[in-house]
Amino acid sequence: MSEPPGEFYTPDRWQNWIDRIDEEDIDPEDEDSARLLLNLQDDTAIAVAKILTAYDEGHIDEEETLEELADVREIVLAEVDIPDEEKVMLVDGVQTSLVPVFYAAEEYVAGGVAEEGTVADYIHAAADAESEEDPDAALGYCAQAGTLIIDGEDLPMDVAEELEFGLVAEWVNGLDSLQTAMSDPEVVEEDDA
């Protein structure tokens, strides 16, 4: 195992990304800016994937896994200190996308893989819950979809593309990063953007 426990993700790593966003001219319409934000998101998803892989391979136990996930969540979902409000909003969008990644990972470890339906079923249920203004249920369904993705099921892109803009669409974007990370947990180098 290449990562010793406790070193899956550090506050410095997150802060390096935030500093970069703070220093650069960020335009979400610009490809390089969009890639930087996506790399920030993917980098976190990769850390989660590495923790889950270490758990699945028996390198860390359930308690340690949940602690590692909680540590990463605390780092990534903390309030960001950037003077530019627009950049804060962009990072907030990334943070929002990552919320179901953490819930799915914790659910996977503590409760196992969802057994009732497919990824598409859960995403449709999440979209329905969102339209009924029940964000907690919508997040729960996204987390269930995430456990299936962690277990190797694919996120159908046609389902993701059908979603109207909103929380579920953002959350599914995060699950897409999780899927990529689970299939190829290579580190996103901060210089790659």
Image (cartoon, rainbow, N blue to C red):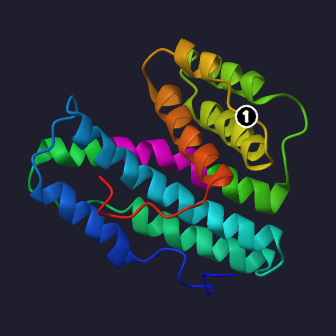
Query: Which residues are the magenta region?
Result: 92-102
Residue 124, relative to residue 180: is it above or below? above
Secondary structure beneath label 1:
loop
Q: Position of residue 92 (x, y in %)?
A: 32, 46
Front residue (pair 103, 28): 28
Horizontally, residue 155 falls left or right of residue 83, namely right
The spot of residue 183 in percent (x, y) is 67, 50
x then y, percent, for residue 115: 90, 38
Taking the spot 63% from the left edge, 81% from the top edge, the residue there is 2
Residue 69 located within the stretch drawn in magenta: no
Front residue (pair 17, 142): 17
Q: Position of residue 187 (x, y in %)?
A: 49, 64
Give the residue number, with chain letter if any, for mark 1: 154
Above or below: residue 50 compared with residue 139: below
The image quadrant that residue 129 belongs to is: top right
> What residue lies at 56% left-to-right and 33% top-to-bottom?
172
